[in-house]
Amino acid sequence: MLRYKRIETDTLTVNKERIGEILSCPTGKRYKIVSITTDPLAHMFLRVYRNAEQIVDIESLACTSGSPLLPMDLPVEPGHVVRAGFFNHEDAATDAKQITIGYEEL
């Protein structure tokens, strides 16, 4: 079954990264993240980490109205923690932003 989960970041600061936990995998479960989306904004880089490994670093403009979901195929095993957020580059807006993932239990 496809599920969705959304987080809202803290207030963003220019030239700083703000990351928050979006999904953790408990013992006995396995997940796969299949998509991610956010509002498209210039100079705002969407970042995703699984534990300490950076998986995504892309300008959020990639999430357009014509193709708002970025496809992913990210397995999440027990003990893994997935964090997502933004790097705010230059003069991008600093208000809190939302990130939504689509995931399945395996």
Image: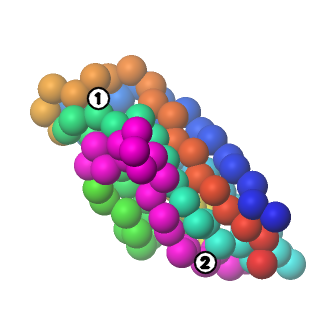
**Relative horizontal placement of residue 10, taking residue 90 as reference (left or right):** right
Q: Position of residue 1 (x, y in %)?
A: 81, 64
Image: magenta residue range: 59-79
Q: Within 10 angstroms of label 1, few (less than 14), some, or many (20 or more) residues? A: some
Q: Position of residue 2 (x, y in %)?
A: 75, 60
Query: Which residue is at 44% across, 58% downward?
Result: 70
**Relative horizontal placement of residue 98, taking residue 41 as reference (left or right):** right
Dividing the picture into quadrants, the one containing residue 74 is bottom right
**Relative horizontal placement of residue 97, taking residue 64 as reference (left or right):** right
Q: Which mark is residue 75?
A: 2
Observer-nearest of 41 and 79: 41
**Residue to which mark 1 is pinned:** 13
Q: Which mark is residue 68?
A: none
Q: Within 10 angstroms of label 2, few (less than 14), some, or many (20 or more) residues? A: some
Dividing the picture into quadrants, the one containing residue 87 is top left
Q: Amino acid at mark 2?
A: Pro
